Image: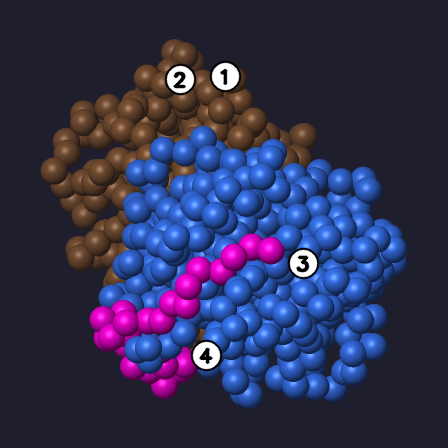
Chain colours: A brown, B blue
Amino acid sequence: MSQTLRTIPHHDGYYMPPEWAPHQQTWMIWPERTDNWRLGAKPAQRAFTQVIAAIAQFEPVSVCASADQYFNAVESLGHLKTKHPIRVVEMSTNDAWCRDTGPTFVVNANGGVRGIDWTFNSWGGLEGGLYFPWDLDDQVARKILEIEHCDRYRTDGFVLEGGAIHVDGEGTLLTTEECLLNRNRNPHLDSRTIERVLREYLGIEKILWVPEGIYEDETDGHVDNMVCFVKPGEVLLAWTEDRSDPQYQRCQSALDYLSQATDAKGRKIVVHKLPLPAPIVSSEEESADIDRSYHCKQRLPGSRLAASYVNFYLCNGGLILPAFDDPNDSVAAATLQKLFPNHQVVMVPSREILLGGGNVHCITQQQPSGKN
Amino acid sequence: MSQTLRTIPHHDGYYMPPEWAPHQQTWMIWPERTDNWRLGAKPAQRAFTQVIAAIAQFEPVSVCASADQYFNAVESLGHLKTKHPIRVVEMSTNDAWCRDTGPTFVVNANGGVRGIDWTFNSWGGLEGGLYFPWDLDDQVARKILEIEHCDRYRTDGFVLEGGAIHVDGEGTLLTTEECLLNRNRNPHLDSRTIERVLREYLGIEKILWVPEGIYEDETDGHVDNMVCFVKPGEVLLAWTEDRSDPQYQRCQSALDYLSQATDAKGRKIVVHKLPLPAPIVSSEEESADIDRSYHCKQRLPGSRLAASYVNFYLCNGGLILPAFDDPNDSVAAATLQKLFPNHQVVMVPSREILLGGGNVHCITQQQPSGKN
């Protein structure tokens, strides 16, 4: 049995490695709910399949699928020819966001791998959460850790999603005030206490508080759609020059903050700008075939979607980049290929994922290599 | 992705190892259905927990539990102190008989491990099967093989349960006519064709057809409750001297058959007799708190239960033996300890398992060691 530990990862010598550290595999969840994904989730399943296929050229992928969808998932993915194996494991979930419901893996110097099982409340619980209930999602991290024989840290009551944080592996963490200080996450904790939990659980020393994430991002501004590390001391910031866009001020505030910030090592932060695609809104057609449901936030036509190239995913030698059918697709690809010379940039069509509320980074979770 | 192979295991160099070959782990399923297990399956869950705890002193155990029971299973098993790890993986099933619904693992000389995913029809389909539907059970083997990254042989339409066969690892297989030639299994195949499938899939050369299994065994006489191998050339036969018991003639017929049989190596078979417990019937109380259900064979009070010590399970250095609170418990334990000097005999109370229709061997499935 994986142990449930009541100790503190940092005290045990564990810390969260950066995304570019070697992975054992990637975890994902097969999308299914017809009140969030249009047309019975079939277009989303195709889009996820393309992401799975892309990642499996670089590392193994485990895909969680419900009992109802198990056969469909295993048959759909069974036809892919990939360099690394794809496996399907049965798991019941409330939706398909493994970044936010999967464990945050931590490692130690001896190759130990454990996982943090944060409390999940559907991005805001009863105050703005996106669906109800979220009980199955809150068990995803534990189930993954059990399968992998990894011990588990459970933070009783500390609400966090993996998409709300990025680390550089050298003591610095990126997050947003908009999300982590939102009263629908941990209203009983002040920012100092939240900082302490992050330090103790992730083994970091300094937290960089970007004010806000992407405009209309329903996660309350997850940092992983707005800013990420390129390497220690360098970040990539989603950027627009369009002053008429409500996103403009958000980018300016982030730049202002990051330009004056130093990291855990005392370095000034180098900020690379990554252009955003032109604003994207959902169409009448794209909203028409979503089941109306008591349980789930309604997706109305004409909604601004939180599209950003920053929501890419790094795997072993690969960089899976969302494409938006926008002129900036090629700019983003070229910029990232230059900044990540050791990774091969692979673009995947992402609109069907975006329509469901996130993108490539949101639907993936890396499991670092180790001796487990 | 585990590959689904359309080739023949024997042609690929694969064969089924005997149960005493080294195991990587044991697979089991957490009992749940309240129309088969009394009192909300709680007594059965306690009995299974004792079996899990006993095995985990000898080797790792993976326990499949439904989404509804996942938390209960993981919390119930989390308190056990065992030498080897126990993990819980989510899996939807129709019931808890991993011997019959799990894969039959096969190995090759290079440490390769694959699995056979026989078609499962609930011990007889629409002609005497025990519950309906059985769709989830028929997917158990595949799901286990996926988790373990083992390639899978699927025999389209060949119905077999793991409890219907025993092998000695040297080319001989034990089965019963009562089960394998029953028209509710493979009525479209004659015995010659069934023999060919067994040869090709299990890598054996000779099939020993014991006429019948245990009286009133609802599996239609699975061999694993009646006869098993002690080692190549030696078998253990469930035995009664009580001429008034309908079981008597079954034992005689088996002895008559085995006494004149030779195995794949041309050896005469040595038959050891293992006394049965005195006949056991279910009580009024034991039948009172089982949900009445459209889906499941009704368990009536006063039913004769198919109790047999032959339904033990061999794990790495251990022999898990059902106890029936019968004077023959100690006779069986002593007999087996003598016949298996390299295994430690551990008795577990089995009545709550027996009430559900099987015993220790029926609820376990060994995964042999290998390089997978």
Q: Quadrant of residue A160?
A: top left
Q: Residues within 10 Å of mark 3 (few under 14, many from 20)?
A: many
Q: Amino acid at mark 3?
A: His
Q: CA gap, disc 4 to disc 2?
A: 51 Å
Q: Which of A146/A220 is in front?
A: A146
Residue at image x 43%, y 46%? Answer: B330
User: Is disc 2 surrounded by few (<14), some (14 to 19) or many (20+) residues within 10 Å?
Assistant: some
Do labels 2 and 1 touch, CB within 8 Å? yes
**Which residue corresponds to mark 4?**
B131
Please give the chain letter of the residue carrying mark 1.
Answer: A
Q: Which mark is residue B358?
A: none
Give the residue pinned by disc 3.
Answer: B166
Q: Is residue B284 magenta?
A: yes
Gap in Å between the C-alphas at discs 2 and 3?
49 Å
Q: Residue at x 24, y 75 (%)?
A: B284
Q: Are marks 4 and 2 on the same chain?
A: no
**Whole-percent x and y of residue A185?**
21, 44
Q: Quadrant of the N terminus of chain B?
A: bottom right
* Mark 2 residue element: loop
Which mark identifies residue A109? 1
Magenta stretch: give its range: B273-299
Q: Nearer the viewer, mark 4 or mark 3?
A: 3
Provide the secondary structure element on which disc 1 rests.
loop
Vertical position of residue B247 compared to residue B113: above or below: below
Side of B176 where A142 appears, left or right: left
Q: Give residue A102's quadrant in the image.
A: top left
**What residue is disc 2 on?**
A13
Number of numbered tags placed on the structure image: 4
| Residue B352 on the magenta segment | no
